[in-house]
Image (spheres, helix red, strand yellow):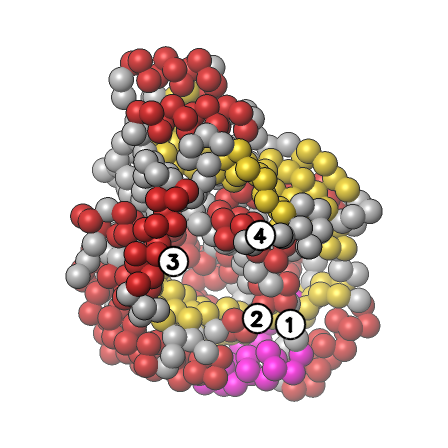
Amino acid sequence: MRQEIVQKLEKIVGSDNCRLDAEVRNLHSLSKNSAPEAVVYPEDSRQVADILRLAGEEGLPVVPWGAGTMAGRGLLSLNGGLVINLTRMNKIIEYDYENMTAYVEAGIPLGELQKTLRTHNLFWPVEPVEPDTCTVGGCIAAGASGPSKLGYGDVKFHILGLEVVLPTGEIIRTGGKTVKNVQDYDNTRFLAGSWGSLGIITKAMLKLRPVPEKETTVFLSFKQLKEAIGAARIIRNETLPLSLELLDDNAMAVLARAGWQPPGKGAGVLVSYSGFREQVDTQVDYVKKQFSGASILEGEKAVAAWRARRQLFPAFAGNTGAVMVSAAVPFTALEEFITRAREELDRSRKGSALISHFGNGHVHILLDAAPETYAGVQGIVNTLASLAENLGGLLVVDNTEDLSLTRRWVEARGKAIMELLSRIKAAFDPKGIMAPNSKVLAYVTNNSRAVS
């Protein structure tokens, strides 16, 4: 990066908030061979706007960054450019108890926000993989919702408005304090989940809920995966749980490495309920009557179980890494997909584990292969992709550079969508500086990413 640009960045954010040292740059990279040229830490929206105007003038690629907990899922490695780390924009601007809203800066850690909200018996019902360290802006930009999406819905249901700095340096606000603040396109939900490719979310108006009177987790284990699938189907359809996770026996074995020893072997079902005491007790009693051997987890025991579930991927991946495959199929096809996927995985003799957000028809498959060695597992991945597509669903690989499956899925919605995506990107970001490594748009805006 030219010294002239560094000086301009330092003038905007101060020399202490503009870092060029390798240690900081490597913390904001997605592979051993890529790193940004500089990392800046703005302290308000105006600084973000000034940085983007400068980046536009210089044609400098920009990647917004929160805690980085989801970066490997939606971004590709990018060598060079500028990372804007928003973690110093971490204030609660307004906490409106009567309207049950909070207006916050994007870089506030979700765990810190929840701690404050719970002192007033409210909370923001979003629980992604790293709920203590992830930032609110990161959750919104990545569309990260976590297992409780089954009961509470997607993160997009829990935001009322945004402040966004566009790549041109202009600042816009969407939505407001009520759900009827939309008089044009629903820009709030359009920008959420765009992985920073259209602008940088700097503030968010959050819709809060009362803390439930009671929360209970139930764990069940079964000798056979088929039995666990049958139980999960009954629990999903007849008890309206908040979260419902299915784990095959390999995933169950990893839970112990993730810090929780499940009370049972074989395949497992982890289910949680929340609400009024009588409601939760009725739901739990129903499960206990249907399935003998149900373990009731409350307090710290429940926290430990869910913490281990969230840490399952890093525990499986260890120091060498793992390929994560994500499939989504209609609920009615879930049993067939999981059963046949497990058979294919066993046939391939690749180390693997399978976990399903069962109520949402979503399945994660972890493969014992470093992402850099993806070619070695591409055969089994393609087999699983065809299986998902034949059952009316889709499958993508979360953490590799290969975009062929993503492209196949997007184009299946009509090839004209590629041109539409290009026009949308150009309308927001005429100079193409924003998150050029965002997976969904990378192959649209960069021909070298295209896969035929």
Q: Nearer the viewer, residue 267 or 197?
A: 197
Residue 445 included in the magenta stretch of the image: no
Dot 2 and dot 1 residues touching (CB under 8 Å): yes
Q: CA distance from mark 1 to mark 3?
A: 27 Å
Residue hosting label 2: 244
Disc 1 target residue? 241
Decide if residue 446 is on the left or right side of residue 183: left
Question: 41 above or below 309?
Answer: above
Mark found first going from the N terminus, 3 or 2: 2
**Which circle marks residue 348 in the picture?**
none
**Label 3 sits on residue:** 316
Residue under numbered circle 4: 184
Which span is picked out in magenta?
A: 217-239
Question: Can residue 205 be seen by looking at this rendering?
Answer: yes
Q: Distance between the Cα atoms at labels 4 and 3?
A: 45 Å
In this image, 220 relative to 391: left or right? right
Front tag of 1 and 3? 1
Q: Real-space Cα distance between discs 4 and 2?
A: 36 Å
Q: Amino acid at mark 1?
A: Pro
Q: Amino acid at mark 3?
A: Phe
Q: Position of residue 322 (x, y in %)?
A: 31, 56
Q: Nearer the viewer, residue 126 or 244?
A: 126
